[in-house]
Image (cartoon, rainbow, N blue to C red):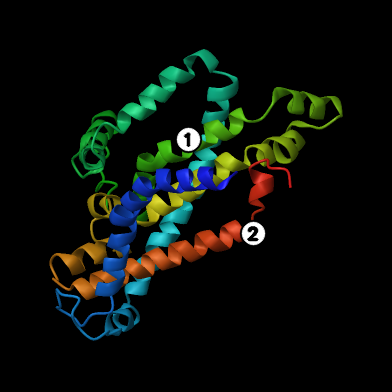
Amino acid sequence: MNAREQRLGICSSLPLSALLLLTFIAPLLAIAAFSIMPAKVFTLAHIPDFSAYAEFVREGYWKSLAWSLGMAAVATGLLLVICWPLAYAMVRIFKRFTLIITLLVVMTLFVSENIRLFGWVITLMKGGLFEGYMHSWTGIGFDGLLYNVPVIIFGLVYIYLPFMLFPLTQGISMIPDDARYAAADMGANRWQIFKEVELPLAAPGIVVGSLLTFVLAAGAVAESKLLGGQAVIVISDDVESAFTYGQNWPLGSALAMVLIMVISVLIVVTLMKVDLDKVMGKVK
């Protein structure tokens, strides 16, 4: 690549770089700056103050963070187990119907997340659709299935299923049939083919789907508020409350920065333990 091509490449990337700087980097820098301001301050013209980070520990906000990360991890694991057979079937079995299944899944994204969750609230609440049908069929009533941790995790699995399914489908589609047939001809059983052939070759889809799902689920708030009520307070709910009801922008910014930093560290540590060149099929 000569100097002229390098300059042309740099000039071509400037508009996108400027857009990313304004829409992604600048808001993060603003949040980071507000996080070291004194409480109840709405301007950046103050001496740095780290009391908001101390309040994260002192007021027990770390518990909300732990709940968010824990439920996100459980939801990601459940989605991996649920989506693998569906993605495998879409690639290997349903073939001609894969487009229809894809469209049906994508169509759920056309409806607001809150509206879909309210549908489950109406279904699972006391006196809702589920209890009504159960009572009419069995004569047994109950207090509803809402406002607990399992139903929050169910909401996370329901909402973020497409974000695990599609990367997994892409990853499984990268597995050549010849590799599976060759392993079977060499005497490998179904479990060995799955562990030694399919999982390694589908690793890009697994890594992308898991990271995408975990990050989105860790920052989710609607599921815990609508399905969980006050059973669990997640960190995103604390961030929203600090910015709105509490009018404490430094605290809200500090909580947001802690969430960003913790998730970033977890992702970096995870990626450091994964050979990305091997996962992506690159030859060194």
Viewer-closest of 28 and 234: 28
1 or 2: mark nearer the eye: 2
Residue type, label 2: Lys
Which numbered tag is attached to residue 273?
A: 2
Position of residue 216 in the picture relative to residue 211 (left or right): left
The residue shown at (32%, 79%) is: 53
Q: Is residue 209 above or below residue 248?
A: above
Res 232 seen here: no
Q: Quadrant of the N terminus?
A: top right
State whether residue 23 is above or below residue 190: below
Q: Which mark is residue 165?
A: 1
User: Residue reaching furthest right?
Assistant: 186
Amino acid type of the residue that numbered disc 1 sits on in the rendered structure: Leu
Residue under the point 44% across and 62% down:
263
Residue found at x 24% / y 61% = 230
Where residue 170 sits in the image (x, y, percent)? 54, 32
Residue drawn at the location 56% of the way across and 43% of the way down: 206
For the residues marked 1 and 2, what is the alpha-carbon distance in whole angstroms? 24 Å
Label for residue 137?
none
Give SS at disc 1. Answer: helix
